[in-house]
Image: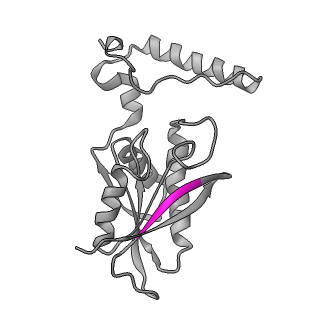
Amino acid sequence: MAASKIQDVAFHNRGVRIAAHLHLPAKFEEGRKYPALVGVHPAGGVKEQTISLYAQRLATHGFVVVVYDSSYQGASGGEPRLLEDPTTRVEDARCAADFLTTQSFVDAERMGVYGVCAGGGFALAAAQIERRFKAVAGISATPMGEAARSFFGHPIPPAEQIESLEAVSAQRTAQANGAAPVYIPFVPEKLEEID
């Protein structure tokens, strides 16, 4: 199986530069229109990891595939760094679709989106509102909202969920008034932090 061709490209989401790789079919022909896919990486991932393995394979089957570092992550811009914001992650996928439509070799009527793990959940959310996506696939998809409410099999009581929302609101107010961002680990950093 011939290898796909990979180009470094970029696009923007609300002024944030998104670093991306564009995977072209191995037998790419100028003047031809190709079906295209947007690949959404897992939480904490980057374009060079898991999502790119799928992109390479899909490109060998004749797809143009764009994978990218989400806003605030990897080689993409935005502050605070490493932010996992579901709304922005969905908008990143839609901006990737915008980018694909500017490529003369992309058939904008044959676009889809796929994602791995949390990226699968974000891909499903993007496909609900982005009508240009004609197909969607989640690979080991994780619904991040549900995961946050029940932390991977350990349900969080509603009162604690409300406390968390109140703490987030207070921190947003503090940041709006000049306070530094507070970084909270996405997963426990030590075994002792797990039940």
- Quick one: 99 or 7, which is closer to the camera? 7
**Vertical placement of residue 68 versus 29, above or below:** above
**Vertical placement of residue 137 versus 1, above or below:** above
Which quadrant is home to the C terminus? top left
State the residue at coordinates (61%, 47%). Answer: 77
Which quadrant is home to the N terminus? bottom left
The percent position of residue 27, horizontal first and vertical second, equals: 33, 82
State the residue at coordinates (55%, 24%). Answer: 183
**Vertical placement of residue 13 versus 154, above or below:** below
The image quadrant of residue 142 is: top left
Judge left or right: residue 112 versus residue 80.
left
The percent position of residue 135, horizontal first and vertical second, equals: 35, 62
Q: Which residues are magenta?
A: 18-23
Colour pattern: one colour
Q: Tell me which secondary structure the magenta stretch mostly adopts.
A: strand
Q: Residue furthest bottom?
A: 31
Q: Residue furthest right?
A: 177
State the residue at coordinates (33%, 77%). Answer: 26
- Quick one: 164 or 45, which is closer to the camera? 45
- How many numbered tags mark residues here? 0
Magenta stretch contains residue 27 = no
**Vertical placement of residue 152 versus 113, above or below:** above
State the residue at coordinates (46%, 52%). Answer: 126
The percent position of residue 68, horizontal first and vertical second, equals: 48, 55
The image quadrant of residue 65 is: bottom left
Magenta stretch contains residue 21 = yes
